[in-house]
Image (tube, rainbow, N blue to C red):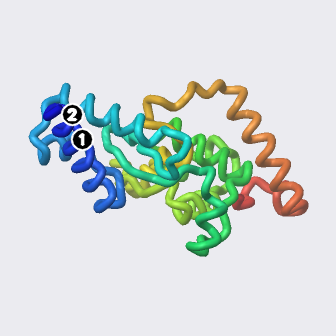
Amino acid sequence: MEEKQETNNIKAAVEAILFTMGEAVPAERMKEALSLTEEEWEKTIKSLQEDYEREDRGIRLISLEGAWQLCTKKEYYQTLVQIAHVPKKQVLTDVLLETLAIIAYRQPVTKQEIEKIRGVKSDHAVNKLIEYGLVCEAGRLDAPGRPLMLATTEEFLRRFGVEELDGLPELPPEKLADFRNEAWKQALELYPEEAAGEGKDV
């Protein structure tokens, strides 16, 4: 009985930490704060995950590269919009998805490398991905001009349901080609005259 109570107290403490922080908290930090062994931590986090996976819960517990965070279940997005007045959901076009795929699988990568792969200027796509919080600056390349490098963010992992970058599915070369073809089709529809030129920014 006492052991069960102790387990519940630890779970409650982890829940309090995650709720208060409101962002992903590294597991190591919580283990240290609560003086837990690796075995105790694994038991606690697994039990807490099971609690949140029940159908009658509106919150879930997710893992992001060794850190943990509480977030709402996607099924309740529309309900939350009514109360929180969240801005219109961001739309990832084929152009943005193609650019994001390149960054995700080649990171850290420079804009020049992205443009070499895509065959078109990518300022607009990169800026949009940064605005959406899916991509961030990741230092500068030690090369002439010191070009800026880009990488995906924690929000990218959260949005696509990936725990860590190593968990990204393997992307066949033909899939990237499909992204490129769809992006060009979209560009031709939006910019029929300009998109035919190699310098069009999409």
Q: Are marks 2 and 1 in contact (CB under 8 Å)?
A: yes
Residue at 57%, 58% in the rendered image = 129
Q: Is residue 202 above or below residue 119?
A: below
Q: In the image, 116: left or right of 186?
A: left
User: Is any part of residue 84 visible from this angle?
Assistant: yes
Q: Callout 1: 10 Å neighbours few (<14), some, many (20+)?
A: some
Q: Is residue 7 above or below residue 60?
A: above
Element under label 1? helix
Residue at 56%, 73% in the rendered image = 84
Q: In the image, 30: left or right of 166?
A: left
The amino acid marked with disc number 2 is: Lys
Residue 16 percent coordinates (x, y): 27, 55
Residue 115 percent coordinates (x, y): 62, 49
Residue 73 percent coordinates (x, y): 54, 50
Disc ID at residue 8: 1
Q: Callout 2: 10 Å neighbours few (<14), some, many (20+)?
A: few
Q: Quadrant of the N terminus?
A: top left
User: Is any part of residue 150 visible from this angle?
Assistant: no
Camera-side residue of 8 and 17: 8
Q: In the image, 182: left or right of 75?
A: right
The amino acid marked with disc number 1 is: Asn
Label 2, on which residue? 4
Residue at 66%, 45% in the rendered image = 98
Q: Quadrant of the C terminus?
A: bottom right
Q: Real-space Cα distance between discs 2 and 1? A: 6 Å
Camera-side residue of 82 and 148: 82
Q: In the image, 39: left or right of 195?
A: left
